[in-house]
Image (tube, rainbow, N blue to C red):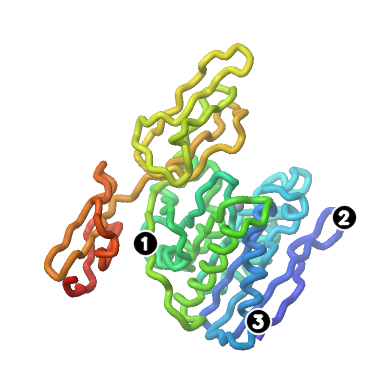
């Protein structure tokens, strides 16, 4: 069963209503809420939801629960192909994703988020689809230490998961940038497991990113029992610190090193590029990794202003990967202490991989020798 409704999120100063479409599929619990394009230029999530719509309205699909989908969460930024709204419309919260769960008496964006929270706040799980830049590795963000959110993130299935610290355990930048008002954080604090997939690329519909998003949504609905099927076992990397950013000390032109590629492992101190004065040719900065980790973003624009993020590096969480080679031989390797995965001559011999971020690896079952 599918229904859709036009709802009014708030009104512009002229009195013109800001409206969007809310789709509802199925009935009963559990309820999964998913939205896209609250940053309006991040349109791959919108296309993910159109394709999910095709699947969910297929007569052969029986939904055991409810899916609520909002493909254009912020029509204002969607129409401007922008990340935020102009100050004239909301001088308090120009970024919609800083004021959840909203306020019907508040600023424009607070009213809009309050209107959507009427749906999201009733859900059993929330997926807030975003996209990064062209040079950002696809990843999924969830609240560090929250096992339900981690389960949701693993079901969505991107290779890289970023466990973001929050509140007291986060750094000052987290608080200063009002990250507590993100939909994911506001919902998690109200015990609704929530994730933010950051599909790569914005402004363009990119097939690879859309494909990851559609598969991720289907897997989430499967994991939460709305549709039948098996969720593929997740076998990726969990890293920490969404804010691991190496910045420009000086304004100029940034020449990235060949090692500065999204998805690459780097070690603290590793050379990642240089910043030059474009006119005098003076060398202004040698850019180094400030931590061991995995590169998840590299700036798209070579012309940088002091303070701009040049490279984002996420720290791997302390975790062990255990390889079961036979019923009696188990080898555990801590990946984040400078030790790398042990070379395996024949990867097909890897029978089971279990991992855990709690430093205590679990071996759930043994598979006989081979
Ligand atoms: Zn976004």
Which residue occupies 56% across, 56% down? 199
Looking at the image, is mark 3 or mark 1 earlier in the sequence?
A: 3
Image depth: mark 2 or mark 1 in front: 1
Considering the numbered disc 1 on the image, is that residue within a helix, a strand or a loop? loop
Looking at mark 1, is its residue's CB closer than 8 Å to ligand 1?
no
Which residue occupies 38% across, 58% down? 236
Q: Is residue 326 visible?
A: yes
x then y, percent, for residue 145? 36, 58
For the view shown, which residue lies furthest in the right direction? 14
x then y, percent, for residue 358? 27, 58
Looking at the image, is mark 3 or mark 2 earlier in the sequence?
A: 2
Q: Quadrant of residue 295?
A: top left
Q: Is residue 102 visible?
A: no
**Vertical relation: 188 (above or below) 274:** below
Q: Identify residue for label 1.
A: 235
Q: CA distance from mark 2 to mark 1?
A: 51 Å
Considering the numbered disc 2 on the image, is that residue within a helix, a strand or a loop? loop
| Label ID, residue 14 | 2
Looking at the image, is mark 2 or mark 1 earlier in the sequence?
A: 2
x then y, percent, for residue 83? 67, 48
Q: Identify residue for label 3.
A: 57
Residue nearest the observer in this picture, 269 or 3 = 269
Considering the numbered disc 3 on the image, is that residue within a helix, a strand or a loop? loop
Q: Residues within 10 Å of mark 3 (few under 14, many from 20)?
A: some
């Amino acid at each position: 069963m599918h229904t859709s409704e036009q709802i009014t999120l708030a009104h512009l100063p002229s009195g013109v209503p800001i409206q969007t479409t809310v789709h509802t599929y199925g009935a009963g619990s559990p309820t999964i809420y998913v939205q896209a394009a609250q940053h309006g230029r991040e349109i791959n999530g919108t296309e993910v939801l159109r394709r999910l719509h095709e699947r969910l309205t297929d007569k052969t699909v029986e939904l055991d629960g409810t899916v609520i989908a909002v493909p254009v969460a912020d029509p204002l930024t969607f129409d401007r192909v922008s990340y935020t709204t102009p100050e004239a419309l909301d001088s308090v919260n120009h970024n919609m994703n800083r004021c959840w769960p909203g306020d019907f008496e508040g600023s424009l964006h607070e009213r809009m988020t309050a209107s959507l929270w009427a749906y999201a706040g009733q859900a059993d799980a929330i997926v807030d689809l975003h996209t990064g830049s062209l040079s950002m590795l696809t990843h999924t963000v969830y609240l560090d230490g929250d096992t339900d959110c981690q389960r949701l993130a693993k079901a969505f299935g991107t290779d890289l998961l970023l466990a973001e610290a929050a509140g007291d355990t986060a750094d000052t930048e987290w608080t200063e940038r009002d990250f507590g008002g993100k939909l994911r954080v506001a919902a998690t604090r109200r015990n609704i497991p929530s994730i933010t997939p950051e599909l790569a690329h914005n402004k363009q519909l990119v097939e690879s990113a859309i494909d990851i998003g559609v598969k991720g949504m289907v897997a989430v609905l499967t994991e939460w029992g709305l549709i039948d099927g098996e969720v593929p076992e997740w076998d990726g990397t969990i890293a920490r610190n969404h804010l691991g950013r190496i910045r420009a000390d000086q304004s100029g032109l940034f020449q990235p090193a060949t090692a500065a590629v999204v998805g690459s492992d780097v070690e603290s101190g590793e050379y990642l590029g240089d910043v030059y004065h474009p006119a005098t040719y003076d060398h202004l900065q040698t850019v180094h990794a400030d931590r061991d980790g995995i590169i998840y973003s590299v700036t798209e624009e070579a012309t940088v202003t002091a303070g701009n993020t040049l490279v984002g590096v996420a720290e791997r969480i302390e975790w062990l990967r255990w390889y079961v080679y036979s019923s009696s031989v188990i080898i555990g390797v801590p990946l984040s202490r400078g030790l790398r995965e042990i070379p395996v001559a024949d990867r097909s011999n890897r029978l089971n991989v279990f991992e855990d971020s709690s430093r205590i690896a679990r071996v759930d079952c043994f598979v006989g020798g081979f």
